[in-house]
Amino acid sequence: MDKRLERILPRVQKPARYVGGEYNEVRKDPREVDFRFAFCFPDTYEIGMSNLGYRILYGILNDMPGVWCQRAFAPWGDMEEEMRAAGIPLYALESGDPVRDFDIIGFSVGYEMAYTAILNMLDLAGVPLRGEDRPGLTPLVIAGGTAMYNAEPVADFIDMALIGEGEDLLPEVVNLCRRAKAEGWDKPRLLRAAAQIQGVYVPSLYDVAYNSDGTIAAITPRDGAPAKVVKRVVHDMDKAYYPAKTIVPSTEIVHDRVTLEVFRGCIRGCRFCQAGYVYRPVRCRSKDLLVQYGQEAVADSGYQEMTLSSLSTSDYPDLVALCDGLEPLCERDHVNLSLPSLRADNFSMELMQRLQKGRKAGLTFAPEAGTQRLRDAINKNLTEEDLHQSLRTAFSGGWNAVKLYFMLGLPTETDEDVLAIAEMANHVMHTWREYASNKSRGVRITVSTSWFVPKPFTAFQWEPQISREEYERRVKLLREAITAKAVTYNWHDGDTSFLEAVLARGDRRLGRVLERVHQKGGRLDAWSDYFSLDRWMEAFAECGIDPAFYANRERAREEILPWSTISCYVSDDYLWRQRELAYQSVTTPDCRTRCSGCGANVVEGGECYRG
């Protein structure tokens, strides 16, 4: 370990974040490595190491002979200050080597508020922020993850964005870069070749022109870049890599447990949900393989917590049988099994009986809206009776805590919809009084609301976000309507949701703003400890950009959107039809009931494959 680091660590919070050396960490002989990949997560160690996708790609890259993937995370403020004072650049945990010396610096980006952390990590590494200021072949800066379905705000800073699922795509990009390095290519040649790989978006190969009103006039590819960059999809989840043998952190992380990904995609088609569209089609892992992975992961890690993960876990066709298959493991090794992402319309007595064998943690459901009209508008396909039937089952089985998640500011929402959330909470309390098998501990009902953020590749990508003042008014309306002592109301901070809406639908002109925010001290903006709306508003003003243009403006159907170069297979025509149905409060059946023709039926064996 660097002697300077030894002096610093006693002075910072959670020093285990910064030393590596964890069980199952991959170390390789540098003499047998010809290519090094710095896998950067633009958030803290506790967040990054909780990310299953990060663990999957770490394992895949390190399984490649000659390639060494190493990890780097955004340091907390105290550590960053110490590093800068001591002249220690951002380094990789496995070797301690500076990130700037790696062949590729790759970022996993799932959240737009992480953009300033990307810039700060590059700066801390001593790497020029803008791609045009990095003329050499290395280090190449790339990024993937859900946020990259609109990479335009960071287009000036990354050399490539990887669109879609990375299990096959990332090794293909790495092998191309290895060839380029071995054969002495220059960077322009590499970028032109990379653009021919499905799923690779090279921002510098696209020219963007603007109309006088600020909207986009044209996006023009050049040097052979495709007009549409089509996402990559893993076709067979049973053949996809699963990290059964994975790093066991030396310090506590957010999700310190075995995570089994039961399927990818979602059958539901909620009109606000970006993940539900961009991860289509649905592809399931087999029950027997999941049981095997669970056994291997618990045996290797010693974890006593296991979660079944997906966008809607209770939609897994063999869920009860899977729970039964995991039961011997859970009983023998005292493993608690949890199921997040439950649907209130299919929470059954069978499922409850399986969950009863573990700890009775609080149940979480997401009605999203207070009235049936608005739930139909967003295509939630959930009735209040569905919710209360599930709660009757849960309360009679001994549960006494429930969390309900909603959004405020959804398209077509009225005050009646807002007040109905309070009425629903009251109905939940009455259901507990009538059906609870154990009233001695009382009931805990938590209502949480977030501010709706319109996202690319959803039916609401053309919608405006309501103003911050209007959001705060609706929060106040609901807060005053919730009077029961058993009901706790939590609401999401509006400032970050406003910025998220700006960045989610922004174009590459926002790069100047991001750079200015970074210069003003912006770094871990996903954390309230560091976020400052004033800093952002100052940067917008100095750059002559109105953030409301991106957050609060309705788009026309014919407008060229910043992400128009990207395809997630789901067509814009389909999304527009879904938007029109929303204004009629007409639902679309889930994909198992009837194919609605979204365009994602591209995977043989997937739920919506039609051959």
Image (cartoon, grey):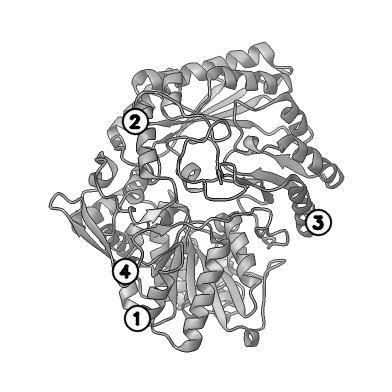
Q: Are marks 1 and 3 in contact (CB under 8 Å)?
A: no
The residue beneath circle 4 is: 205
Identify the residue shown where x is 40% and y is 41%. Answer: 458
Whole-angstrom CA distance, mark 1 to mark 3, is 47 Å
- Report whether 470 appears left or right of 181: left
Percent from the top left, x then y, of residue 132? Answer: 31, 75
Q: Quadrant of residue 192?
A: bottom left
Q: Quadrant of the N terminus?
A: bottom right
Whole-angstrom CA distance, mark 3 to mark 2, is 51 Å
**Along the line of sight, the residue nearer the viewer: 262 or 79:** 262
The residue beneath circle 3 is: 299
Which kind of residue does numbered mark 3 sit on?
Ala
Identify the residue shown where x is 61% and y is 66%. Answer: 58
Which kind of residue does numbered mark 4 sit on?
Leu
**Mark carried by residue 580:** 2
Where disc 1 sits, the SS reads: loop
Say whether disc 1 or disc 3 marks the residue closer to the N-terminus: 1
Percent from the top left, x then y, of residue 374? Answer: 41, 24
Crowding around mark 1 (Cα neighbors within 10 Å: few <14, some 14 to 19, many 20+) is few
Where disc 2 sits, the SS reads: helix
